[in-house]
Amino acid sequence: MLTDTRLTERNVEDSDPLQDRLSPHIHLNLNVRGLGPSATLAINEQCAELQRQGRDVFRLGLGQSPFPVPDFVTESLREHAAEKDYLAVKGLAELRAAISGYLRRTEGLDYDPDNILVGPGTKELMFIVQLVYYGDLVIPTPSWVSYAPQAHILGRQIRWLPTDPATGMGVTADALEAHCRADPDRPRLLILNYPGNPTGIAYSAEQLQAIAEVARRYRVLVLSDEIYSGTRFDGEHVSIARYYPEGTIISNGLSKWCGAGGWRLGAFAFPSHLRWLLDGMAAVASETFTSTSAPIQYAATTAFNGGPELDRYLADSRRILAALAGFFQRTLVAAGADCRPAQGGFYLFPSFEPLRARLEAHGVTDSRTLCTRLLEDTGVAVLPGSNFGRPSRELSVRLAYVDFDGSTALDALKTGEQEVDDAFLRTYCPRVVTAAERMADWLSHG
Ligand code: GLU
């Protein structure tokens, strides 16, 4: 209902059409002013539009899994297509039990299914946790595109932790300590994402232990975004919850390792004494999204229960992703870029600072212009580092090496291909290979 008195007065005085009277200058929430669509979704739509116009675009913008949802999981969705009732706000009991089992299997951690909250994607749950928990958002630069805008919409303070390219641009215990020491009692929510978006970097057990120690000292709530856990190339994902169980919420879902981003299914697992936070979030959920899609929850139960088919799918996906990451990283480094090798996920976060003089000579002085020119000249679509909290002048970009048909590539491994070498990549992921070579050529020759 509109309660703005100015509007009501004008309603009486004149008879403008409604849209003339609803002014964004008066009626748009201040925290939403100036916000456009999220960069990942905007680049996806821009690429689709360019392709409709007949352009050959290499889609390395949106981080979408190239692989199909495993057959046994789509089969489960088919079987449950007729499930049409609203489900419990916190999620289907069988799914929460399956997620609890998954965390026991993969992490050796025990979560009571009652302490698990299911939602329509972890992105929505991240927004709600920031709404319900009153604290500063602490994230490293660079971080995924949506953490900071969510905090901004909710009016939370955003504190960027400085990072060091030499150590992979992740959170360090020292940076967290320095940040917290300045104001020890402030409530804070630290988001840790590993394998990381946008860098592809994972933390070692020692790094996680050191971060956990600082977080415990300053009672920092940690949201551990483990959506890429199943893509870690060596299969050895370790959660910080092993070292800081009392202060960590684990976030995971189907979007990445299960190839089901569009299904929108995510979940948070809480330590038991943070039940009040889960309950607060569930109250908001009940007043907003009600419950998560029923057929998807049944299929997700099948996915989280896992089994040999999922194990094979994950192992094969990881081999392909690891080979692509290696090929792309080596190609860019050979062309003069700085780029750390990835340890999982779909991304690389190269910096072209070593090539600044040459790029500046062509009018490229910031990451946004860099991406625009790269797209115009080569057809390769990537996102500017500035979307991830890097200074706008820094010549960094995020690329998602996902423009290939994952179904054909997985089939090739099932039906006899043994090696995932450069020849395999040229046959089954030709667009990613070409995109890497075009980028390298563009960097070398301008
Ligand atoms: N997480 C993916 C990305 O960073 C896409 C999904 C999204 O941003 O909502 O590209």
Image (spheres, rainbow, N blue to C red):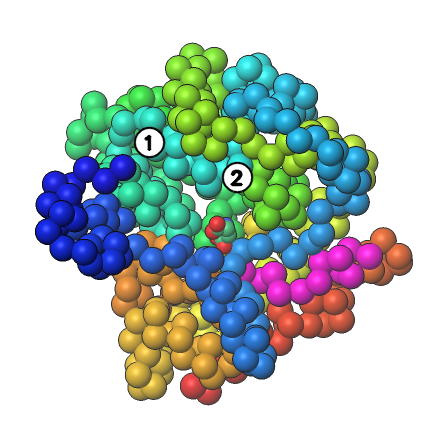
Magenta-span inclusion, residue 410: yes
Q: Can you say which quadrant of the picture contains the N terminus? A: top left
- Kind of residue at badge 2: Gly
Q: How many marks?
A: 2
Give SS at disc 2. Answer: loop
Q: Nearer the viewer, residue 193 or 74?
A: 74
Q: Name the residue rendered at 39%, 48% in the picture.
A: 146
Q: Position of residue 244 (x, y in %)?
A: 44, 22
- Kind of residue at badge 1: Leu
Magenta-span inclusion, residue 439: no
Q: Name the residue rendered at 76%, 71% in the picture.
A: 427
Q: Position of residue 82 (x, y in %)?
A: 73, 34
Judging by the rendered image, the residue that carries numbered circle 2 is 121
Q: Nearer the viewer, residue 283 or 338?
A: 283
Give neighbour class at mark 2: few <14, some 14-19, many 20+ (Cα, 10 Å): many
Among the 4 quarters of the image, the one containing residue 297: top right
Answer whether residue 252 is visible to the viewer in this image: no
Give SS at disc 1. Answer: helix
> Most extreme residue toward the top, as rendered?
273
Q: Name the residue rendered at 35%, 83% in the picture.
A: 358
Among the 4 quarters of the image, the one containing residue 15: bottom left
Q: Does the residue tagged 2 have its C-beta within 8 Å of any atom of ligand 1? A: yes
Q: Can you say which quadrant of the picture contains the C terminus? A: bottom left
Among the 4 quarters of the image, the one containing residue 287: top left
Q: Position of residue 165 (x, y in %)?
A: 38, 55
The magenta segment is: 400-411
Name which of mark 1 and mark 2 comes first in the sequence.
2
Relative placement, left or right, of 377 versus 4 is right
Q: Position of residue 353 (x, y in %)?
A: 35, 70
Residue 131 marker: 1
Query: Relative to 20, does residue 253 appear above or below in the rendering?
Result: above
